[in-house]
Amino acid sequence: MLSRKRNEPTSSSSRHAETSLISQGTIIRGDIRFTGTLHVEGRIEGSVLGEGPNAVFTLSEHGQVQGEVRVPHAMINGHVHGDIYASERLELAAQARVVGDVRYSSLEMAAGAQVNGRIAHQGEEHVHRELPAPEVRNEAATA
């Protein structure tokens, strides 16, 4: 019975297998697609795409992304020069600096975080709403 438990992967070891790290001093040129968790302390020059509903992208205070970020969950504490699309949850920590538009479903923004662009909620029921055109009255002709 003890030997069987040793052969089975534990939840913590399976979690580590799903986490990728781009360490400080590393530069990636090109788009990145990932599942699980991607933690970036280096620099990415390209788009970041999280595949699957549980994909998590974390950008440390030393990390940089020069490109678009499209993920379900994101925790940003570094620099992003591009648009961010977080379909589930976006956390902008105190050192976050974003130059680009931000779209989110749920947002947490710490004091000190900066966004130079538009911030917009994108719910599942995202509907473009317009006011009806005003009625034109021709009162001068009747007077």
Image (cartoon, rainbow, N blue to C red):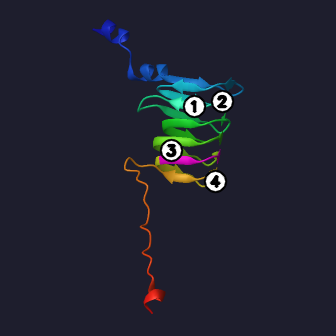
Q: As drawn, which residue projects farthest toward the right?
A: 25
Residue shown at 39% from the left, 22% from the top:
11
Disc 3 is placed on an element classified as strand
Q: CA distance from mark 4 to mark 1?
A: 24 Å
Q: CA distance from mark 3 to mark 2?
A: 19 Å
Horizontal arrangement in the rendering, residue 123 relative to residue 99 (left or right)? left
Mark sitting on residue 44: 2
Question: Which span is picked out in magenta?
Answer: 98-104
- Mark nearest the camera among 2 and 4 is 2
* x and y percentages locating residue 23 in the rendered image: 65, 26
Q: Amino acid at mark 2?
A: Ile
Kindly check if marks 1 and 2 are in contact, taking CB atoms under 8 A apart as contact: yes
Categorize mark 3 by other alpha carbons within 10 Å: few (<14), some (14-19), many (20+).
many
Q: Split into 4 quadrants, where in the image is the N terminus?
A: top left
Distance (Cα) linking label 3 and label 1: 15 Å
Task: Identify the residue position indicated by label 3 in the image.
Answer: 90
Q: CA distance from mark 4 to mark 3?
A: 15 Å
Q: State which mark lies toward you, 3 or 1.
A: 1
Amino acid found under the numbered disc labelled 3 = Leu
Q: On the rendered structure, is 95 left or right of 122?
A: right
